[in-house]
Amino acid sequence: MWSALALTTLLPLAIAINVPQTYINTAIARTIELGGLTTQITTQYNIKPLDNSPGEYHLALAGENDVEPAWWEVSLGGKKLEGRLLDESPPTVAVQLGKTKKDEVITLSLTQVLAHTSTPLPAEIEQRDPQYLVWNTNSTYVDSWYPTDVERVKIRAPHPSILSYSSVPETYTRDNTITKSGGTLTLGPFHSLPPTLGTTKIAEQKAFSVHYETKDPVIGIRNLQRSAEVSHWGANLNIQDYIELVNEGPKLKGHFSRLAHQQSKFHASVPAQILTGFTMKLPPTAHSPYYYDYIGNVSTSHFRQGSTPATVQKNKKVRTSPRIVEGNLELKPRYPILGGWNYSFTVGYDIPLGDVLKTDSEKNRKVLAVPFLTGLKDVVVDNAELKVILPEGASDVQVYTPFAVDTIEHSIHKTYLDTTGRYAITLKKAQLTENHAQNVYVTYHYPLSAQLQKPLTIASLVGSLFLLGMGLRRVNYSIEKK
């Protein structure tokens, strides 16, 4: 029994690390863009098959501590490839390269976005001090299941001010190990690297860190709750977001000085760690935005409505060429948000239903497109929830997501003048970036009887009240007997 248990325990591990050596990387070029909460990594692989039927190519993702990146995408010749995520350490994606020939060089691109890989150092600063972050990684070389002829890694900081960085081993280098040019560090080139993963790995990895300055606030969203309510009679889709925003930069050391803040605003030199406002990109036809918090309406906002070719042609005063322009909603919190401070608020807007709802006449179904979130540059959403509320009477509901979500829940949502309640779908996902700002598609059946359900209910209620009033007027309430 113990032998069988040990075999079943070791068998998945043996399968996970057994990658056939049917490829060789002729060249690998990786570019790492450092930011606040996100780190974007773009890696280009020049691959050469060692066999006419090499099978799948395995790509090791760059997540730290065996954590999958918040976002990743594989492309071949500019076209996206569907990858199969394997339960390996580190997380690995297996992709089919199609028909390949021996010694044919193939160029593969891998784009990844990591979350929370940089931390403030020092962790506390004065109000007017610059802010610095330190980025850490467990691997100097690009993790690969195959040998590599030549490899180069570039690390780009958002500002040329780099305080320090680690050293790299000189085992596989012939030239300078690290070259610094402004805010860019070039590691390598490294030559004749063996695989860094698998049973035959030889190249041992070494941790690497960069201590750099950033000129933008390090902003994160701990909780995002979005509701999308569909109204067929109103021909409207209402989007409302409840956002718990936090400044994850260095915490404020000491007390906040309003005088120093006003002086910095007057001289247009607000410290980098202070958030005074931000801009949200809205759909081109979004209108009627609103913005409030626990106190009430926040008037420090400005909305610039977008446009589409149809709206531009209607406006004869516009002489520019018709094109799609997104709307901009500029928001300013009630108070400046410093490191470690929080701010919770609600923002919403309306979209004409005809822009997001289509009808499949062949299947007699409605197709609704709802944006999962509004993307903000270099912002990580720790937990997001999207609740789509369909009109009363919708049935046969199906959901199609552009990426994998953690949970999908189906429920009934009841509000004013509802009888049976409205069908609602709730989607939840953790660790999102601006790359996840994509549409979720919901299809449902909505017959004419369901469309008439609410007006008939209202008519019945008004008629009942009218009949009740007529009956009560005919009742004798006097206590005297004639």
Image (cartoon, rainbow, N blue to C red):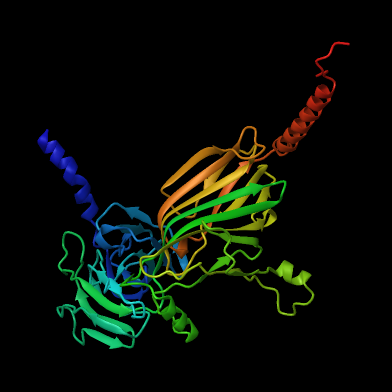
Residue 202 coordinates in the image, percent (x, y): 15, 67
Q: Residue 416 or 259: which is nearer the viewer?
A: 259
Residue 265 coordinates in the image, percent (x, y): 48, 81
Residue 178 coordinates in the image, percent (x, y): 23, 84
Residue 313 coordinates in the image, percent (x, y): 76, 71
Q: Looking at this view, name the residue that lies furthest to the right.
A: 482
Is residue 56 visible from the viewing direction of this image?
A: no
Q: Looking at this view, name the residue that lies furthest to the top.
A: 481
Image mark count: 0
**Left or right relative to 9: residue 373:** right
On-image quarter of the N terminus: top left
Q: Residue 250 or 205: which is nearer the viewer?
A: 250
Q: Looking at this view, name the residue that lies furthest to the left.
A: 2
On-image quarter of the C terminus: top right
Q: Is residue 209 above or below residue 220?
A: below
Residue visible at 52% across and 53% down in the picture = 226
Name the image quarter holding residue 41: bottom left
Q: Is residue 345 above or below residue 427?
A: below
Is residue 283 visible from the viewing direction of this image?
A: yes
